[in-house]
Image (tube, helix red, strand yellow):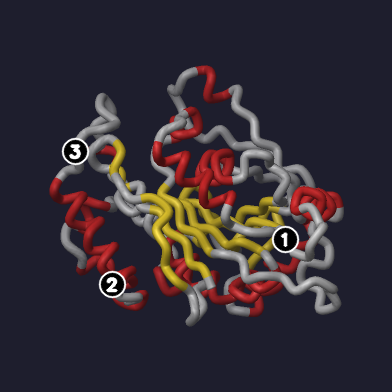
Amino acid sequence: MPTGVDRREVLQGVAAAGVAGVMGPGRSVAQQVAPALFVSHGSPMTALDADAYPQALQRFGEGAGAVKALVVVSAHWETDARVHVTAMAAPPLVYDFYGFPEEMYRLRYAPPGAPSLAQDVVARLSSAGVPAVADGERGLDHGVWVPLRHAFPEARVPVLQVALPADATPAQVARMGEALRPLRSEGVLLMGSGGVVHNLRRVNFRNKLASPEPWAAEFDAWVAGKLAARDFLGLQSWMDAPNARVAHPSAEHWLPIYFVLGAALPEDRITPVFEGFHHGTLSMRSFALRA
């Protein structure tokens, strides 16, 4: 950012404009490459936490630079036939969880939407062979707004959500990241929200600080090793990993990682955001790609 220009003023101006011109070639200020981020979002109750995990997300947000918009793929939205992209100027929140304390349903997070960016995302995905459509009704689910309340608490950065294709393969989700990768050079942060280990049947709900189960730790270590080696193709063969089907009885929380890896640049450094477990089986491993 140029000297004397306040970052808050820039973001407010972008939000007011609906991110118009984010992709335009005539911008006068050189834009840094935005990070890509994978978040293991864990329980919705992390929205109320103030411990190491939300603190790590806050530090990430503070160091993310002048992010102009956020494009997020969450485990909690899948669509058939065509990938849907939120396109409202003011997306509502989706409280897609049940049986939680009433306080959870009173939480608010109100970032602006990005209708013009949504149309651009639809066009880029469609051109890459991923049929997509703008969605004027669906809001942001907890896989989006819970981590963003910690990472970008002021809710000034425009947010849009992209659905997972139903029954998607890792390669298909990676193609989505590849299609949107150029947006990083325009200051758009691409984010996948899911979980490195996610098996709700094996969660120790009574003890958030329980030691990780050996099977969960083994799968988590396999993922960490593949990331350290930048073996992104090897990660697509996740069913060959130890305890794969125990770690993920269904794949929806695992697939968003490929959206982020598909958006990787050759010069990216993989930097940890958080490492650790909640409730004995939920790996909260989160990481960023930074050019």
Disc assigned to residue 211: 3
Disc assigned to residue 79: none
| Residue 217 or residue 119, whichever sits in front | 217
The residue drawn where x is 56% and y is 45% is: 151
The residue drawn where x is 45% and y is 30% is: 49
Provide the residue designation for mark 1: 118
* Camera-nearest label, 1 or 3: 3
Q: CA distance from mark 2 to mark 3?
A: 27 Å
Look at label 3 and name its amino acid: Ser
Q: Earlier in the sequence, mark 1 or mark 3?
A: 1
Query: Residue 189, relative to residue 46: is it above or below?
Result: below
Q: Is residue 216 left or right of residue 64?
A: left
Tell me residue 217's x, y (percent). 20, 51
Crowd around label 1: few <14 · some 14–19 · many ≥20 (10 Å)? many
**Residue 14 picture quarter:** bottom right
Q: Earlier in the sequence, mark 2 or mark 1?
A: 1
Look at label 2 and name its amino acid: Ser
Q: Is residue 190 left or right of residue 49?
A: right
State the residue lying farthest toward the front.
Answer: 3
The residue drawn where x is 70% and y is 37% is: 110
**Residue 123 picture quarter:** bottom right
Crowd around label 3: few <14 · some 14–19 · many ≥20 (10 Å)? some
Provide the residue designation for mark 2: 237
* Camera-nearest label, 2 or 3: 3
Q: Secondary structure at mark 1?
A: helix
Q: Quadrant of the C terminus?
A: bottom right
